[in-house]
Image (cartoon, rainbow, N blue to C red):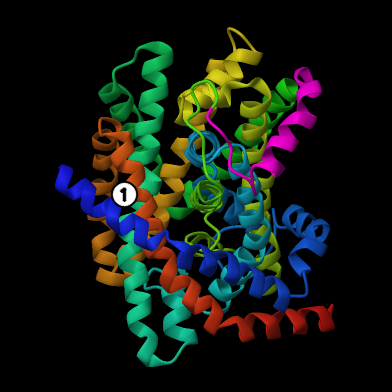
Amino acid sequence: MQLLTDLITTLNGIVWGPLMLILILGTGLYLMYGLSLMPLRRIGYSFKLLWQGRKAKGEGDIAPFNALMTSLSATIGTGNIAGVATAIFLGGPGALFWMWCTALVGMATKYAEAVLAVKYREVDNKGMHIGGPMFYIKNGLKPHWAWLGTCFAVFGALAGFGIGNTIQANSVADVMHDTFAIPHIVTGVVIAVLAALVLLGGIKRIASVAGKLVPLMAITYVLAGLVILTMNIEMLPNAFSLIFTHAFTPIAATGGFAGAAVWAAIRFGVARGIFSNEAGLGSAPIAHAAARTNSPVKQGHIAMLGTFIDTIILCSITGLVIITSGAWSLGETGASLSSAAFETSLPGYGSFIVTFGLSVFAFTTILGWSFYSEKCVEYLFGEEAIKSFRWLWIFAVPVGATANLDFMWLVADTLNALMALPNLVALILLSPVVFQLTREHVINR
């Protein structure tokens, strides 16, 4: 086991090295420049389209609003609670700054992904709309790039069992054990049963559940966080000072915090930012490809809100609560750090808020990612593999609930990078299509 851990650690250091961070941020910056900062300028228009998208008509299987909710169900998960805490523990408060940067440029990335997903989607033998990086690589690029789509599908199918399944189950099992002393295996089995009741109904049932749970859980979590920040309002100026100062300068050890270099703030801020909002991974466009719409650009506008809501709003709430409470220097990490921060400000209630939020967030992530990985498996092996995949996915939940968390995070981080590589290459190669469709939409409005 140690040998496997060492090998994955070495691979992780390579795939999350300077070149990967430059590729992720560079792709986002390039797309943002090519779009003339449109994702930042048209956030209001995007929210208008989202509201209208509750009952939109057109080709597709689910409403544009539910497509975003399905996407958010996968992105709003342990990354927003445990991931932010881990980034701050490893990189210091400055890591939150780099999470913000990743999200802002990631809005352009997410926009481009959804535009291409709708533009190049297909209809399978059951009449369902399917799309994502493997399809815009296959249908948008020349045949000699087809291997890139296959690579994405392989990495996407495997990555789902890490980022979208075992990590989520493990984090919930941990926090349920710490808060209520419930055995890990019991939590795992309960989640697996609940997931089975939804997953076996396919994308329409997943979208229906996500469309109800995601807004409810996001609003509840934000309100709880705002209450704490209001209570600690005098600490906010110092919190922002820590964030901006230590994004560019090392931070010394203090209390239980071991200290961190600037590179650690950048690396873990970007890595956990991508883990949370998934901009560049190529996962979200798989959901947006199923949207009922005839306009790739309109769905792109709706899709980019996923990054804004996930990181700029939810991750910021978690990070600021951790920093203003002073819990970041206690030496805790993951969900335990977030729980300690909420409990410090709301004694007797804070840990329950984190427990409930993490449980619901993780459950919906398991639902959303099951669809992503399922479509990757379908691309590789055909529709006959779907049923077997769903049962394997359900079985993996209790297994993940009892696994080693550090090892699972390491595997998930590595698979995320491998999944992002073919998608980022495709986005760069197909960027002229994105720019052209966007210009045509603006002219015809």
Residue 233 in sight from this viewpoint: yes
Q: Is residue 365 above or below residue 29?
A: above
Placement of the C terminus among the 4 image quadrants: bottom right
Q: Which residue is mark 1?
A: 411
| First to last magenta residue range | 230-253
Q: Give the x, y percent position of residue 282.
A: 48, 64
The answer to whether residue 251 is magenta is yes
Where residue 334 appears, x then y in whole percent? 46, 31
Residue drawn at x 65%, y 75% is 30
> Residue 90 at x, y = what percent?
48, 38
Look at the magenta stretch and give its main secondary structure.
helix
- Number of marks in the image? 1
- Seen in the image, is 372 located left or right of residue 25? left
83 vs 8: above or below = above
Q: Which residue sits at x=24%, y=40%?
A: 395
SS assignment at label 1: helix
- At 61% from the left and 27% from the top, the residue drawn is 322
Q: Is residue 131 visible?
A: no
